[in-house]
Image (tube, grey):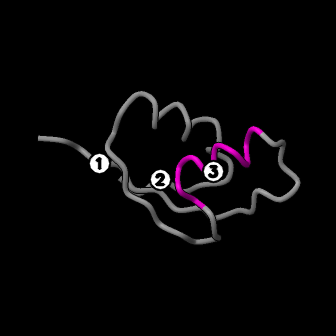
Amino acid sequence: MDTSITFTQVKSGIGSPKAIRATLVGLGLTKMYKTISRKDTPEIRGMLNKVKHLIRMEE
């Protein structure tokens, strides 16, 4: 059974470094309070760890 992880962007990426903004786009977070569900993989976990100050996890 594949597990998924759900997360929501709660803070803006404006003023963040380019790499942080690119990570948000890579995760599919393009607007505030947008909720996304992705398969729980090490790659996704690493991206979420990089932007943990801008998102809220909802497992």
Q: Quadrant of the N terminus?
A: top left
Identify the mark at residue 4; answer none if there is no mark: 1
Q: What residue type is disc 2 on?
A: Met
Q: Which mark is residue 18?
A: none
Upstream in sequence: badge 2 or badge 3? 3
Q: Choose top left, top right, bottom left or bottom right for residue 41.
A: top left
Disc 2 from disc 3: Cα separation: 14 Å
Instruction: Check the image and report above or below for 40 versus 9.
Output: above
Query: Up-down: is 28 above or below 17?
Result: below
Is 27 contained in the magenta span? yes
Question: What secondary structure is the magenta-colored segment mainly?
Answer: helix
Residue count near mark 1 (Cα–Cα under 10 Å), binned few <14, some 14–19, many ≥20:
few
Q: Nearer the viewer, mark 2 or mark 3?
A: 3
Q: Is disc 3 surrounded by few (<14), some (14 to 19) or many (20+) residues within 10 Å?
A: many
In the rendering, at what x and y percent does residue 25 appear?
A: 62, 52
- Counting from the top left corner in percent of width and height, residue 29 is at 58, 59
Q: Which residue is mark 2?
A: 57
Tell me which numbered mark, 3 or 1, is placed earlier along the sequence.
1
Q: Name the residue carrying label 3.
A: 24
Q: Which residues are magenta?
A: 19-29
Residue in the image at 81% along x and 42% along y:
18
Give the mark toward the camera: 1 or 2.
Answer: 1
Choose between 54 and 38: the one closer to the eye.
38
The residue most toward the top is 42
Contact, CB < 8 Å: mark 1 with mark 2?
Answer: no
Q: Amino acid at mark 3?
A: Leu
- Under circle 3, the secondary element is helix
Q: Quadrant of residue 58?
A: bottom left
Give the Cα separation between the discs numbered 1 and 2: 11 Å
